Image (cartoon, rainbow, N blue to C red):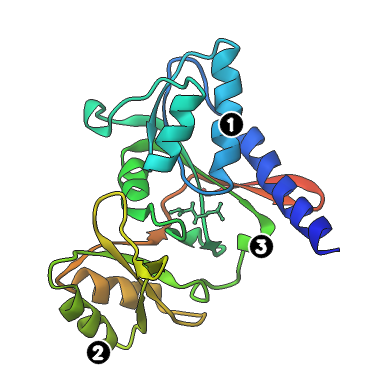
Amino acid sequence: MITMVKDMQENKKKIVGIKAAEYIKDGMIVGLGTGSTAKYLVERVGELVKDGLKIQAVATSKATEEQARELGIPLLDVNEVEYLDIAIDGVDEIDKDFNATKGGGGALFREKIVASLSKEVIWIMDDSKLVDAIGDFPLPVEILPYGYKVTLKRLKDLGLNPVMRLKNNELYVTDNGNYIADLHMSAPVDVKDIKEKLDNTVGVLETGQFLNMCNRIIVGTDDGVKIFENK
Ligand code: 5RP
């Protein structure tokens, strides 16, 4: 039973990855997201490139870069581009105003840079990511290792319940060489208030708050793919 539910979840991720790839056209510079849903997108883009699609891509993490390279997708360094035509990525939680939490996979900083450079942003997900109000998924915040204990204390004093992210019992290190504090709150949260607090906290480098930064979302459901435009 559990295996069946997992398979259905995987299938939802796969169909949105495949659907999103339809938006990629010849000549585009494409931002490739990170995570278990974006992985299917990258897989599909690899197939299309093999079949002759002519694109160049910017990866949002070392993991995605590695996957793309193995699949023969031509890669550009982000510093080589002035803009991207399209960026496609996953999310951890999203509300009906298209406010999202991202960074569960730790790639939030690069994901935000890529999204901010992109003319069009598409987020792909299974339907478990759609929520009435964001806040239950711990909000990842990338912080500078230098003085991180002070930053952690400041976040605590703001009532944001930070917990340092660990990997194999060590502090988790991002692709940028920084740490992540996950802020444990509960929905509904006041996203603007949290943004202001984080913007004003020295040591916080970037946050997983992606507020109304996408043009469309593609959602995998029991009834297939659903697309919602952000007008
Ligand atoms: C990585 C991300 C991912 O897009 C997000 O965590 C969703 O991942 P998944 O598709 O595996 O649920 O922000 O930093």
Amino acid type, callout 3: Ser
Residue named by callout 2: 157
In front of the other: 149 or 28: 149
Amino acid type, callout 1: Glu
Disc 1 residue crowd, few under 14, some 14–19, many 20+, Cα 10 Å = some
**Marks 3 & 1, CB-CB < 8 Å contact:** no
Q: Position of residue 15 (x, y in %)?
A: 70, 40
**Left or right: 45, with 208 as reference point:** right
In front of the other: 218 or 161: 161
Q: Report how far apart the C-alphas of labels 3 and 2 lie in the structure.
A: 32 Å
**Left or right: 199, with 124 as reference point:** left
Task: Identify the secondary structure beneath mark 2.
Answer: helix
Q: Report how far apart the C-alphas of labels 3 and 1 lie in the structure.
A: 22 Å
Q: In front of the other: label 3 or label 1? A: 1
The disc label shown at residue 43, or none: 1
Q: Position of residue 219 (x, y in %)?
A: 66, 49
Amino acid type, callout 2: Asp
**Marks 1 & 2, CB-CB < 8 Å contact:** no
Vertical arrangement, residue 157 with respect to residue 221, above or below:
below
